[in-house]
Image: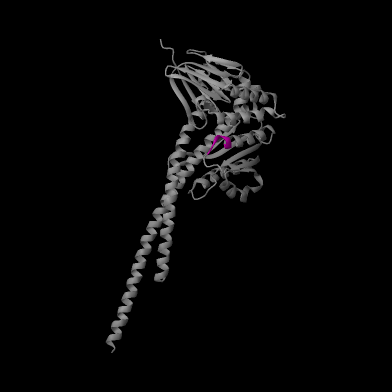
Amino acid sequence: MSEEFKIEIVNPEKSFLVKEDVLEVVVPAFEGEMGILKDHISIISFLKPGIIKVFSKSGDENYYVEDGIIEFKNNNLSILTSTIISVADLDKSRQGDLLKKAETEASKSEISDQAKYLADQKVEVLRSIN
Amino acid sequence: MASLDDLKKRIASVKSTQKITKAMKMVAAAKLRRAQESAERGRPYSEKMNNIILNLSNGISDKENAPKLLSGTGKNKVHLCVVMTSDRGLCGGFNSNIIKKAKSYFSKILNEGKQLKIITVGSKGNDQLKRVYGDKIIENISFKESKNANYFDADKVGRIIIEKFEAGEFDICTIFYNQFKNVITQIPQAQQIIPLNNEEDHNNSDESYEFEPDEDEILSNLLPKNISTQIFKAMLENSASEQGSRMSAMDNATRNAGEMVDKLTIEYNRSRQAAITKELIEIISGAESL
């Protein structure tokens, strides 16, 4: 029996990525990183800023996301996100821009704890990409 | 009868108008393709979002405490209408179709004795509505600077709506936009986004999901996003419709200008001939009298 399932990443503008031969996906779920294999139980979860790792027969890919929601059902993984960038496309200057934005956001004093947490996450993840 | 010179000038002016409308048609056709593509590409996102929310709302434990964005305030008093139109004119019946639809809805609401609030997106809608409903318009948003519909603009509108909802300024929110069917047909739509209307199907409720965090929290986070998504979808549909409508309007205008040029040319030739004949008769009768 094959161990593959389907992944679909969509953002509001377009269908970002569709793959049929995925073996494992690691997503930065709200309560910690979560690996998804074939025949995972149906799940709906939020994403926090982090890296989505897609392991497939045709190669591994990493994507940076800032937010989103995932739904896994009948071996179909749907990821809805408004900001997604392939790590391979994330060059130094773009990374720096995003980092600066996240840092200013995190340093604001009047934001809520949750927003602060998310902004801190962004900073952390962006620093870690290298 | 107009003189030869006048006719000549008119022919020239109609011809140059025809050139302009032709160019506008071509520009609209090029933009239409892009707008149509992005409208089609945007559909999966809003469909998936809808699906997830449907699944979530079926699985929600107690309906009483469901987020207000889903279940409504329980009242039906103040209606907020978001009328989405274009920022540019010369696009046939595009704007007036939306306005017509919106106006009939407005008068229905007012006849029922309910309160009406209006947000206009796009300057053309504002222009047409402010004469009659000027005092009802609470906000006017326009994205003249952004070339294409983008998610951040939609999110801005969504945030404004949610802010007002949380401040208790309205109970029911409806958006008006044109759904793109094809180049000649755009259907004006009225879609209720708050509270969410999901009586369509409850058939897949036997699916059991694991939620992380729990469903209430997901739902209360997701619903505001859904509002922006729905508005974004409306914006995409609208921009495709606008270009389609403009294209067919400009096509018609080009054709009409062509007909007019033909008619004027015939008239011009006739009066030229008449003038020549008249001169000939004058010369001949002058020669005869000698």
Q: Is residue A65 left or right of residue B280?
A: right
Image point (62%, 27%), residue name: B71
Counting labels gives 0
Residue at the extreme left of the image, as rendered: B288
Looking at the rendering, which quadrant does residue B225 occupy? top right
Residue A17 pos. (x, y %): 47, 25
Which one is nearer the viewer's eye here, B205 or B104? B205
Q: Residue at x 41, y 55 (%)?
A: B19
- Please determine whether, in this image, residue A1 is positioned above or below residue B287: above
Q: Residue at image x 59%, y 39%?
A: B82
* Residue B73 visible here: no
**Between residues B12 and A97, which one lies in front from this camera angle?**
A97
Which region of the structure is painted magenta? B149-153
Q: Is most of the magenta stretch helix, strand or loop?
A: helix
Image coordinates for residue A87, horizontal then vertical, percent = 52, 24
Q: Is residue A1 above or below residue B122?
A: above
The extreme bottom residue here reads B290
Task: Determine if residue B147 is in view.
Answer: yes
Is residue A19 or residue B277 the one in the foreground?
A19
Magenta stretch contains residue B62: no
In the displayed orientation, state which residue is furthest to the top: A1
Residue B150 magenta-highlighted? yes
B162 shown above or below B15: above
Q: Quadrant of the C terminus of chain B?
A: bottom left
Q: Is residue B171 left or right of residue B5?
A: right
Residue B276: x and y in percent read: 32, 75
Residue B100: x percent and y percent? 54, 46
